[in-house]
Image (cartoon, helix red, strand yellow):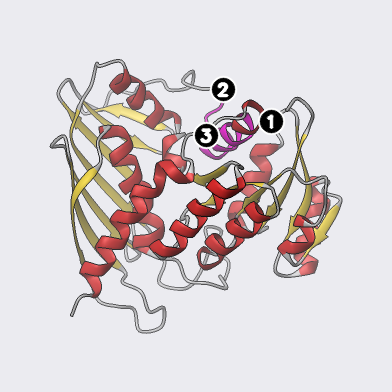
Amino acid sequence: MTQTIRVALAGAGAFGIKHLDGIQKIDGVEVVSLVGRRLEPTQEVAKKYGIGHVATELSEALARPEVDAVILCTPTQMHAAQAIECLQAGKHVQVEIPLCDKLADGQRVLDAQQRAGRIAMVGHTRRFNPSHQWVHKKIAAGEFHIQQMDVQTYFFRRTNTNALGQPRSWTDHLLWHHAAHTVDLFAYQAGSPIVQANALQGPIHPQLGIAMDMSIQLKAANGAICTLSLSFNNDGPLGTFFRYIGDTGTYLARYDDLVTGRDEKIDVSKVDVSMNGIELQDREFFAAIREGREPNASVRQVFGCYQVLHDLQRQLTAP
């Protein structure tokens, strides 16, 4: 494919806007349809980004023959069903993390992708952040092997709000959303599947119905281990902090910043064409479409992550 890739984006909220900003920097891609739950605010976003078609139903965008691919930035509970709907319509699809919140739904997406022969990718952004790419290249070159990862994912979110602090129509989840980033990244960076996983969680929030604190331990087949702490109760520095402890050094990554264990800054500005992980994720999606290949973070590649999350949920809900 050499012509312009025409995209429909569903979900014009905080993360949908991140994708729209990233796509503006990518040549040969045009967003031609924007889907949102409420018409008026969706029209406002479409006007800002010069998008000609607006809809409140995904099916309206999928019916447009010019649409080649879809990016789903909708609520978690809709991801799997909408991804299948896109594939059945003959569209390539990138679904924001997580792929699903039930393993059986993820399996159905994988099955649909294999039947459709279209590209299906999941937004596991940590694979694309330059800081983590830098570490991955060291590993691929045989210069660094992970012994342990220590990860903290901390937010202050005691009400149902999104990344912009706006009210949400759905409830976020520490396990199926936020832990998914680290569970996948650990297996990806260790180059080895996860063979052991344990979890503990704190009290369930009386209104939100979710655990606000969680602790997870992972072990890969090659012996590497990972400890992950997650909280929606942390009133302090927010975000995710990764410590890579390896045989030849220690590295601390936070989004696009990387330092050694001795707090020496590492320049990651030349690792890729951008410092924006969402933009790099989208570039991979469109490159895979053009080149007719499986993308990094395809549904097939990340499926093992959701098998681990499923096992952890069974532990947490066991009587």
| Residue 177 appears left or right of 316 | right
Q: Which residues fall within the magenta stretch?
A: 273-287
**Disc 2 versus disc 1: distance between alpha carbons?**
11 Å
Q: Give the residue pinned by disc 2.
A: 273
Of mark 3 and mark 1, the one earlier in the sequence is 1
Relative height, residue 162 to residue 303 (above, below): below
Instruction: Name the residue nearer the viewer: 273 or 136.
Output: 136
Classed neighbour count for the residue bearing mark 1: other residues with Cα under 10 Å, few (<14), some (14–19), many (≥20) = some
Q: Nearer the viewer, mark 3 or mark 2?
A: 3
Q: CA distance from mark 3 to mark 2?
A: 17 Å
Residue hosting label 3:
295
Dot 2: few (<14), some (14–19), or many (≥20) neighbours within 10 Å? few
Q: Nearer the viewer, residue 251 or 4?
A: 4
Residue at image location 45% in from the left, 34% down from the top? 129
On the rendered image, what quadrant is the C terminus found in? bottom left
At label 3, the amino acid type is Pro
Asked which secondary structure carries label 3, the reply is loop
Q: Is residue 13 above or below residue 184?
A: below
**At label 2, which amino acid type do we have?**
Val
Which mark, residue 26? Answer: 1
Q: State yes or no: residue 281 in magenta.
A: yes
Closest to the observer: 15 or 180?
180
- Residue type of the residue flagged with mark 1: Ile
Residue 306 in which image quadrant: bottom left
- Residue 240 in view here: no
Q: Residue furthest front?
A: 115
Percent x, y of residue 4? 78, 32
Could you tell me what secondary structure mostly forms the magenta stretch?
helix
| Residue in the picture at 25% in, 76% down | 203
Query: Relative to 117, does residue 260 appear above or below in the rendering?
Result: above
When the figure is inspected, residue 111 is found, relative to residue 1, above or below; the finding is below
